[in-house]
């Protein structure tokens, strides 16, 4: 049970050193989070524009609020232009879907429109293959054709009567429906991706319908502005000023596809850091600072204990130094030299060195907290708990179960391999 004691002491020390960012105004919190995101982006390919993208990331994360679904933040990639042409939509944006003739006649901008979201086809459909219809009179054939047309017209008429000015569907909206809506000044888009449709529903407050019967106002979404906008060589449908406001879209611009892909991965890292900092408002200094401080604390505590327990605690403290050591190795610095500096700084009696960690920019040490290199305290606590439990589990294994048959099979295979090598060497000697 000794591990429980010093593991608990390490967790208590984390709680003691943790700093809360709660209780601050929204602007102060956004400023702190932007600096935290900028630190994350500083080592990335887009590090030159880290301030620009950091504020964009913070605004996107705050827009989705407490929603845990990461797909509520969409990232759309448009090749061309430069990084600063990227922009954030407080709502939903997606590329224009495939459209039929008549699409260009539709309006491309609405103010406060009602939005109808569907999961049905609005297309003239003939009967399925192998369908059999028996007619007693050739004149009845026309009535069947008329029925097919009446079905689609009835659906389209119900969509129009709902009062919606924007109609989106996950399935196809055919040429007949496209022209029908265009004649009535309604915008439509079919084959909208499932993810985009769900984000539109979350942002506008609408509900995806699987039928056009009994459409009421409560299932329709709305937004302040809908417009179709040219972005590079693509056209985008943009919903902004959404009442629910639980989604955001970052439209990324850049020269090459590979560059934009890397920029997306970099922004994903920043988004995760900001989300974690918002969700768990207490943070500790990163860059190996918290690990070195806990290590110092445990070494100091070990000196107050007589017996073998002192050795255990010292070993536990030494193991915590692997984090700053690995950071130094990854950055190509002399780990021994940096760790000696950190030990000296953290040993100061005033405690002013408690937040000092590895500075990968200079190869020395720096105040991680001042430089906004943070870690959520819950992540560090969970990591230490998991590592301690894993080590104890491995140490508790005193015997392993062996399969004799497996061992004998492996032994025979090794013996035959050795014999094969011996025969090969013998033939080589005879050739000589």
Image (cartoon, helix red, strand yellow):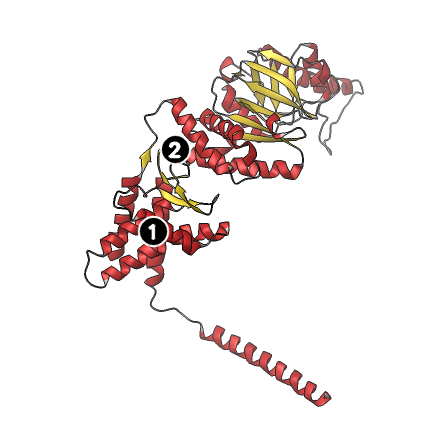
> Residue reaching furthest right?
138
Q: In the image, which disc is placed on residue 343?
A: 1
Counting from the top left corner in percent of width and height, residue 275 is at 43, 33
Confirm whether residue 172 shows in the render: yes
Counting from the top left corner in percent of width and height, residue 69 is at 47, 33
Q: Residue at x 53, y 30 (%)?
A: 53
Precedes in sequence: disc 2 or disc 1: 2
Counting from the top left corner in percent of width and height, residue 211 is at 57, 22
Judging depth in this view, the residue of 406 and 38 nearest the camera is 38
Left or right, residue 32 beside residue 430? left
* Image quarter of residue 126: top right
The correct choice, above or below, for 173 with respect to 270 in the image is above
The correct choice, above or below, for 176 with respect to 293 in the image is above
Q: Residue at x 55, y 31 (%)?
A: 49
* Alpha-carbon span between mark 2 and mark 1: 32 Å
Task: From the image, tell me which residue sits under label 2.
Answer: 279
Confirm whether residue 206 shows in the render: no
Q: Secondary structure at mark 2?
A: helix
Counting from the top left corner in percent of width and height, residue 431 is at 73, 88
* Image quarter of residue 398: bottom left
Q: Secondary structure at mark 1?
A: helix
Q: Nearer the viewer, mark 2 or mark 1?
A: 1
Left or right, residue 296 beside residue 87? left
């Amino acid at each position: 049970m000794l591990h429980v004691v010093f593991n608990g002491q390490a967790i208590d020390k984390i709680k003691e050193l943790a700093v809360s960012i709660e209780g601050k105004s929204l602007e102060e919190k956004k400023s702190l989070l932007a600096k935290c995101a900028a630190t994350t982006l500083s080592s990335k390919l887009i590090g030159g524009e880290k301030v620009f993208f950091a504020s964009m990331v913070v605004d996107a994360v705050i827009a989705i609020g407490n929603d845990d679904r990461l797909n509520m933040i969409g990232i759309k990639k448009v090749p061309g232009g430069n990084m600063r042409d990227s922009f954030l939509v407080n709502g939903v944006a997606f590329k224009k879907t495939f459209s039929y003739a008549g699409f260009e006649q539709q309006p491309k901008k609405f103010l406060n429109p009602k939005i109808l979201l569907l999961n049905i086809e609005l297309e003239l459909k003939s009967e399925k293959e192998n369908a059999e219809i028996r007619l007693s009179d050739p004149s009845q054939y026309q009535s069947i054709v008329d029925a097919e047309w009446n079905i689609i017209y009835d659906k389209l008429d119900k969509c129009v009567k709902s009062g919606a000015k924007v109609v989106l569907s996950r399935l196809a909206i055919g040429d007949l429906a496209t022209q029908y809506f265009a004649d009535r000044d309604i915008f439509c888009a079919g084959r909208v991706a499932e993810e985009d449709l769900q984000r539109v529903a979350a942002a506008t407050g609408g509900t995806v319908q699987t039928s056009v019967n009994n459409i009421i106002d409560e299932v329709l979404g709305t937004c302040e502005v809908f417009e179709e906008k040219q972005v590079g060589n693509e056209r985008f449908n943009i919903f902004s000023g959404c009442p629910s406001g639980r989604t955001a879209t970052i439209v990324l611009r850049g020269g090459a596809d590979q560059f934009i892909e890397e920029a997306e991965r970099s922004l994903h890292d920043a988004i995760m850091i900001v989300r974690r900092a918002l969700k768990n408002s207490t943070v500790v200094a990163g860059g190996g600072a918290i690990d070195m401080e806990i290590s110092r604390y445990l070494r100091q505590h070990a000196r107050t204990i007589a017996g073998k327990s002192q050795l255990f605690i010292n070993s536990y403290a030494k193991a915590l130094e692997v984090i700053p050591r690995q950071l130094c190795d990854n950055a190509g610095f002399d780990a021994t030299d940096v760790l000696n500096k950190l030990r000296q700084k953290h040993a100061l009696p005033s405690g002013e060195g408690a937040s000092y960690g590895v500075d990968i920019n200079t190869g020395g040490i720096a105040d991680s907290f001042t430089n906004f290199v943070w870690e959520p305290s819950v992540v560090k606590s969970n990591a230490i708990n998991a590592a301690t439990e894993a080590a104890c589990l491995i140490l508790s294994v005193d015997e392993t179960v062996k399969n004799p048959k497996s061992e004998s099979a492996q032994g025979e295979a090794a013996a035959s391999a050795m014999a094969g090598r011996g025969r090969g060497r013998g033939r080589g000697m005879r050739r000589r």
